[in-house]
Image (spheres, coloured by chain):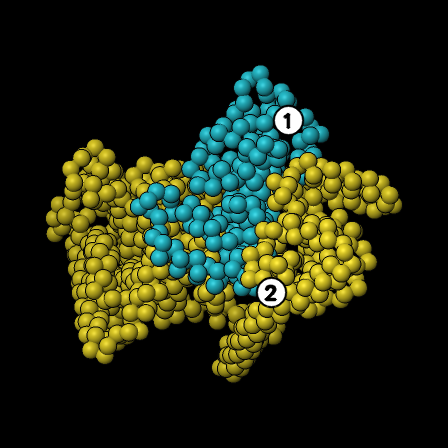
Amino acid sequence: MDSVDSVFYSERLGPSNNPLLDQLPSYQSLLYRRKSSATGSTKRRGSSRRHLSSSSSWKWKGDKVEEKPKAVAHQRLICELPKTMEEKRRDNVQRMEQARDLSSWKQWRQNTHHSLKRLKEDCMELLRRLKLWRGDIHVIEGMFGTGILSYFSFLRFLVLLNFVIFLLMFCFIMLPIIIAPHTSGNATFDLYNGRECSNYPSTSRRGLVVFHQYITDLLSGTGFLEETYLFYGYYKVESIYFPKFSYNLPLAYLLVTITYLFLSLIWIVKRSAAGFKRNLVQDEDRFQSFCNKIFAGWDFCITNETAARLKQSSLLYELKTDLEEERIKQKIADRTRREKCRIYVLRLVLNLFVVAVLAACFFSIYRATIYSQEFQSSQFDQRPNFILELIFEYLPSIVITLANFITPLMFTLIIQFEDYSPAFEIRFTLMRCVFMRLASIGVLLFSLWSQITCDLGPKCPCGYKHSDYPCWESRVGQEMYKLTIFDFIIIGAVTIFVEFPRKLIVTYCDCGLAKWWGQQEFAIPQNVLEIVYGQTICWIGTFYCPLLPAICTIKYFIVFYIKKMTLVKNCRPATRPFRASSSNFFFLVVLLIGLALACVPVIFSIAQINSSRACGPFMNYTKSWEVVPEAVSQLPGGLPTFFFALSSEAFAVSFFVVTCLAMFYVIALAGAHKRVVDQLREQLAMEGRDKRFLIQKLCQAQRTSVRSAGVQSHADRDRQSNRGAQNHDDPGGVFLAQPPVSATHV
Amino acid sequence: MGTTASQLQKDLLSEYQELTFLTKQEILLAHKRFSELMAKEERSSPSLRVPMEKILTMPELKSNPFRERICHVFSTSDMKDGSLTFEDFLDLLSAFSDSATLEIKSHYAFRIFDFDDDGTLDCGDLEKLVNCLTGETEDTRLNPEEMRQLITNILEESDIDKDGTVNLSEFQHVISRSPDFVSSFKIVL
């Protein structure tokens, strides 16, 4: 231990044996670094990386540090010193004594600083305790490492997001309606003249209702559920008159919709910003991939022995594939023209095949949706029995789930023939799966849209097929509601009826087939895709079904426990692990794509499709968006002019131009930074070489002078203490071959 | 919690809080777990050493391939047997805690990976390190050719001054750009 310390500290912290070496720029930059990190130590959490990297030796002014190097060392927090407890304690006592010399004002300031810090830590601890699932996530992290942990914290984030969206919906839309009767408020709506369009037959079942019909209603959102707070159609309120003011519900409805989309966007972007930056940096230095795997490869959190063994084998696998990849790259470079042609043709054919599969899936979703819609518009008494009815209702969901189950299997099979590099294979399969998942929602919405709308004309006076869809928004809401429920049922069912029996078979059956099949892997990408799919539906559906966020909150809350159970009991972690840093970013990117996809239909239906005349808050407007210009024109003073100016083309064009300019500026800045980094890196390597050369010369010169003075013992001691650092070509001539600290912190 | 709190005096506790990155709860939990490793009658003496074999039975360390190195690095014993006192144990947890700085973490990681304690990571250290990561048995090891290629690659990436070894500052430089390190270099009780 002591010998190690002498190597570590004799050159770095204590006075170096060689006074010349103290004057090296690299050593002084180290001192500077310590100082800067000491001043920043109050906000050390999270900022350590920054002051590590921001300390550049070029800015440094030589005389400042030499004045009081001791004071600099004392500024650092004790717990930040890499020393044993005994030494730290001694240091602390020393500091206390020195502190006694300080003026009382400084002492007081130091003390209050300390107690404030303590208080802050206690508060943070308390807050952390309040966090949802802290214990569960802790356990998962301990057992399976950070990759899987990131999946669960992502799930927690979605629960929170949905809960906040629900609160928004509840406070601004439901609450006014609920409290209106109690505060002598008055909710009004007047029916528009379009008689034909405003005819809205009740769908609730009449006469004797059999019990199972309630179940059907509950699962598909029809019947008694249709006329509740659950769906858009219920909010048939023009404005609510409270004693003091009137509440414009349609405007609130629209604004809340825009707000929740914006809120989600900002929240996701904020969460992904850190990961995005990191990813950019990482992408730039590809040349550090092996070091990352070796030096930061082990997850010290892992306590589960199987998980540890798996981690080892996955690391082995990863290293082998990486080494293999280098060889494959070589092979790809060596390909003959004929081989290249063959592979490109093969890829083309396979891609065509993939497109065909996707097209077939989309077409079947389209057919299923239309069939299901036609069935729902048919008369009650023509309907077959209860089970068939449910199946027809859920046909689109079933087809989507089936397609999403089969296609990933097919993609993983196909990709093997395409001869890509292993890393790209995984990414490409994933991209195809993401596309499949999200596009299937798009196709569903498209087929709904084609069913609902018709061109305005004598045949179609309302702008939508009012005979089949008297309140089409509610119908879309029902579809989204069904998708959500079905997704939830599938997650539960797969866990209970597929993964659990599989685990049983693999554990208790000794035959070869079962062993080959193996235990279920907890594949993070697929699981993430699943919940992103659910979230996209939720975003789309919230406009049509304002209580959907609440349902999603509950759903994800339960999914968390299901997934935790299946992870602990049924699954093993995937052999190909997901790194926490890359996965966090991946999750949020997929989620962003989902959000973008969700925005399109919502915005389109607000701005383009005629709102139903028979139900909902926008029954008096042709299009939902019209409520905004009307509200703006009622504003007092010059505000309407101001807002109309904002929405004019002139403003839009100039705004666009300014945004473009800003973007170009940022891009140029990024490019410049990148170049500077490259240059600095080059300079660094050069300086390292220079320094080594200089130090060699210096030490040689010094040694000859020392020898001539006849003081041999000093040099011997030096040689001894630097034994370890000395494996160079010229062991006799260089006894301080290692520069004390090379200025490597760019 | 009440019983453990009485066993650890208040001033000592606040001193530990001062000297480590741990919070009060974590220190108390550490104390509880550490005293479980000792026999009942020994628990009162604070400077008692617990031999490495006993420390390694803790589930947090049991499946860690670096467990013996960790004990050796944090041990203050003169015998170099890897035995830990309670304070050494707190040092260990502090370095592996959530709030420890990157500098501390990378410093100790370097010493853990420096198998022959000579202050640099040379080829031998790197080979041992890779073997620890992939598992020690014959069939899980990389073959010599792959190992050679891997070590060349690592040195190419991290050895800035091209002296054939990785020293502490080079190591810290590499680590500071590795996004996963801070989150994975962590032991939670």
Tell me: residue A380, above or below residue A336: above
- What's the residue type where badge 2 is placed? Val
Q: Give the residue number, with chain letter if any, for mark 1.
A: B47
Residue shown at 41% from the left, 61% from the top: A589
Q: Nearer the viewer, mark 1 or mark 2?
A: 1
For label 1, count other residues whose C-alpha is less than 10 Å away and answer few (under 14), some (14-19) or many (20+).
few
Dividing the picture into quadrants, the one containing residue A742 is bottom right
Dividing the picture into quadrants, the one containing residue B132 is top left
Marks 1 and 2 share the same chain: no
Which disc number belongs to residue B105?
Answer: none
Instruction: Give the image location of residue A254, x and y in percent.
Output: 45, 62
Instruction: Give the image location of residue A27, x and y in percent.
Output: 69, 60
Q: Are marks 1 and 2 in contact (CB under 8 Å)?
A: no
Instruction: Give the image location of residue B39, x and y in percent.
Output: 54, 19
- Residue at mark 1 to residue at mark 2: CA–CA distance: 43 Å
Q: Is residue B68 visible?
A: yes
The one nearer the camera, B146 or B84, is: B146
The one nearer the camera, A275 or A382, is: A275
Judging from the image, mark 1 belongs to the subunit labelled: B
Left or right: A273 with respect to A431? right
Tell me: residue A636, above or below residue A713: below
In the picture, one chain is yellow; tell me its letter: A
Q: Quadrant of the N terminus of chain A?
A: top right
Q: Colour of chain B?
A: cyan
Q: Give the residue number, with chain letter if any, for mark 2.
A: A746
